[in-house]
Image (cartoon, grey):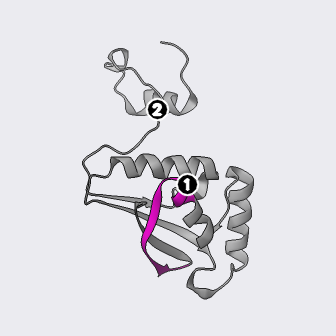
Amino acid sequence: MAALPSALRTVADRVLDSAVLDRVQLVPTSGPVPAGDRTVLLCRLLEQLPDEDAVLALRENAAAVPAGGALLLVEQVEGADGIELDTEAALHHLRLKAAFGSGVRTERDFERIAALAGLRVASRRDIGWDHRLWELAPAR
């Protein structure tokens, strides 16, 4: 078997039964959720993605939602609940910025990313603890 990336080695070493390992091909991939689900909930996925990857993730997930379905997004938002980032949230922002190049985004940032993915905000509401829930729909 060819050398595997570390994440796949973990799967091969700890999850798969060694008796079947020679019949399994582990292939690193990424892509949209399986088609057919009526509702897709993305919870704090975009905080670990730079803008270009966040746009791609939204676009791919939206493409997997059937007509009449819903794409829901829950993310921490700078300024949600009408307050600015506290010290802990500011540190979280700096960690995300340093590790992933993303940071805690503003409402305007999320709406820009959604628009670049070909989506519009159908509804939004604060759900507490600096988090907001968006329902995204195809742009008209």
**Left or right of 78 in this view: 40:** left
Measured along the vertical axis of the image, is residue 107 above or below residue 57? below
**Left or right of 8 in this view: 85:** right
Q: Look at 51% across and 61% down and name the residue there.
A: 44
* Amino acid type, mark 1: Leu
User: Which numbered tag is attached to residue 29?
Assistant: 2
**Of 139 and 93, the residue lying toward us:** 139
Residue at the far top in the pictured view: 1
CA–CA distance in space, label 1 to label 2: 23 Å
**Left or right of 102 in this view: 30:** left
Q: Look at 32% across and 18% down and name the residue there.
A: 19
* Amino acid type, mark 2: Thr
Q: Look at 24% across and 48% down and name the residue there.
A: 36
Q: Secondary structure at mark 2?
A: loop
Residue at the far bottom in the pictured view: 82
Label 2 crowd bin: few (<14), some (14–19), many (20+), radius 10 Å: few
Q: Quadrant of residue 133?
A: bottom left
Residue at the far front in the pictured view: 140
**Measured from the top left, where is residue 130 in percent x and y?**
57, 77
Look at discs 1 and 2 and give the one toward the viewer: 1
Measured along the vertical axis of the image, is residue 105 above or below residue 81? above
- Residue indicated by mark 1: 116
**Measured from the top left, where is residue 140 in percent x and y?**
40, 61
* Residue 115 located within the stretch drawn in magenta: yes
**Of 21 and 35, the residue lying toward us:** 35
Tell me if label 1 and label 2 are in contact, CB under 8 Å: no
Q: Which residues are magenta?
A: 113-129
**Left or right of 85 in this view: 33:** left
